[in-house]
Image (cartoon, grey):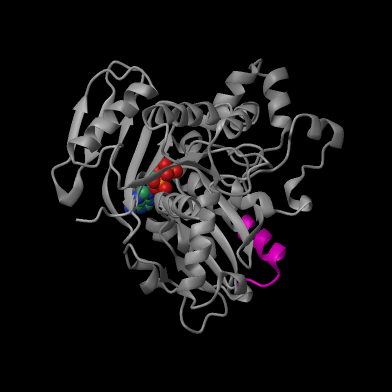
Amino acid sequence: MTEARPHRVLVLNSGSSSVKYQLLDMRDGSRPAGGLVERIGEGSSRLVHTPPGGGEVRERTEPIADHAAALKAVAAELAADGLGLDSPELAAIGHRVVHGGKHFTEPTLIDEAVLAEIERLIPVAPLHNPANLTGIRTARELRPDLPQVAVFDTAFHTTMPEAAARYAIDVATADAHRIRRYGFHGTSHAYVSRRTAELLGKEPSEVNVIVLHLGNGASASAVRGGRCEDTSMGLTPLEGLVMGTRSGDVDPAVVFHLKRVAGMDTDEIDTLLNKRSGLVGLCGDNDMREIRRRIEEGDEAARLAFDIYIHRLRKYIGAYYAVLGRVDAVVFTAGVGENAAPVREAAIAGLEELGLVVDGELNAVRGDEPRLISPVYARVAVAVVPTDEELEIATQTYALVRG
Ligand code: ADP
């Protein structure tokens, strides 16, 4: 029997207290196994593993001290399904890395120099890059010989022109501290803009798309001919749209005011704007389903939170329309974008003059496939395209290791 050439990619997304993993078969895009470990470092860590072939999900709660222990537990689960890290069919591991700065414009084969550069970027990504690095280092210890690839959230946005990427602050100060707009969710914006071109029966180079990635974190991007021209997140994922727990755009003077008048320190303000703002800060809930339920019951705080969310979203649609000049599609993705018909309807309402119309019946249809929600006569397509960051990371990883 001839041995199958390596055709599987393991995608790892290492967060500060969690590891998400997904094994993909690159011959057909199927997902033999996946899962997550959460609450790493706490007494009640939890591992949830979905085995191949629709087998019963395995779940256990036990102390998992650190990322090394978490990855070893993941490796053991995969091995129990005959899909261990030592399998000759495993071609590579693809790691999601949040911040690649200006330096990393492409998926990159990981070596010591790459690790050192990701480490150098910790000051601009203090929450994310250390966790990503720990995941990579542990995976390299487990399989030192296996190609491992870093896929950066920022990479897709490195094509932004300086006019969009620079803040209007003193250049020397900005450069000394690498302060510029990097953007995030790039893997999703890349994937979704490409799938949108496919949905329209065109090449990515032929279409201009506004992508609205509305998950718990949320960002918009303006993509011209497959290249990002602007995006709403900046130095960190705090800028831009109203999110589940993040404020998005605020006057930077709010920070001085909170320091001088409210006596808050930097960490408290960081927590306020990142964790206690956005939808949760406005109405106590960050789940759009719950907010819609409360609105149905006449809840005023939920209504106002929704209105602020939509107002900001519409401002970005207008802004990116102007950035692109000609728009072929506005596309909604991620948890809210894919599921919340009222958000899509409210975001596009009244924009007929821009060629944007949503068909109520099409908008109400649920599904996992890319689909148009604009009527056939509309000048600009409005679409829902489910995102798939794992598939995109695996595809980029596999393309790199296969050469
Ligand atoms: P993350 O940024 O964590 O990856 P997701 O893209 O999974 O987020 O989006 C999660 C959010 O999607 C939830 O907080 C919720 O607001 C929203 N969401 C999920 N399902 C629905 C639904 N059926 N209707 C409305 N909103 C939904």
Q: In the visual, does 69 lie left or right of 268?
A: left
Q: Which quadrant holds residue 60? A: top left
State yes or no: residue 326 in magenta.
yes
Residue occupying the point 55% across, 59% down: 211
Q: Which quadrant holds residue 142? A: top left
Quadrant placement of the N terminus: bottom left
Residue occupying the point 24% across, 37% down: 78
Q: Is residue 244 visible?
A: yes
Q: How many marks?
A: 0
Q: 50 or 253, which is in the foreground?
A: 50
Residue occupying the point 45% across, 57% down: 333
Q: Position of residue 14 (x, y in %)?
A: 43, 33
Position of residue 245 relative to residue 232, above or below, is above
Q: Position of residue 206 (x, y in %)?
A: 61, 74
Q: Which quadrant holds residue 260? A: top right
Residue occupying the point 63% across, 51% down: 157
State yes or no: residue 211 in magenta.
no
Q: In the visual, does 80 lie left or right of 130?
A: left
Q: 148 or 325, which is in the foreground?
A: 148
Position of residue 133 relative to residue 344, above or below, is above
Q: Which residue lies furthest to the bottom in this view?
A: 377
Q: Residue furthest left?
A: 56
Q: Can residue 296 be seen in this view?
A: no
Q: Position of residue 129 (x, y in %)?
A: 54, 30
Q: What stretch is highlighted in magenta?
A: 315-327
Q: Where is residue 264 in the image (x, y as percent from the top left)?
A: 63, 17
**Magenta stretch: dominant secondary structure:** helix
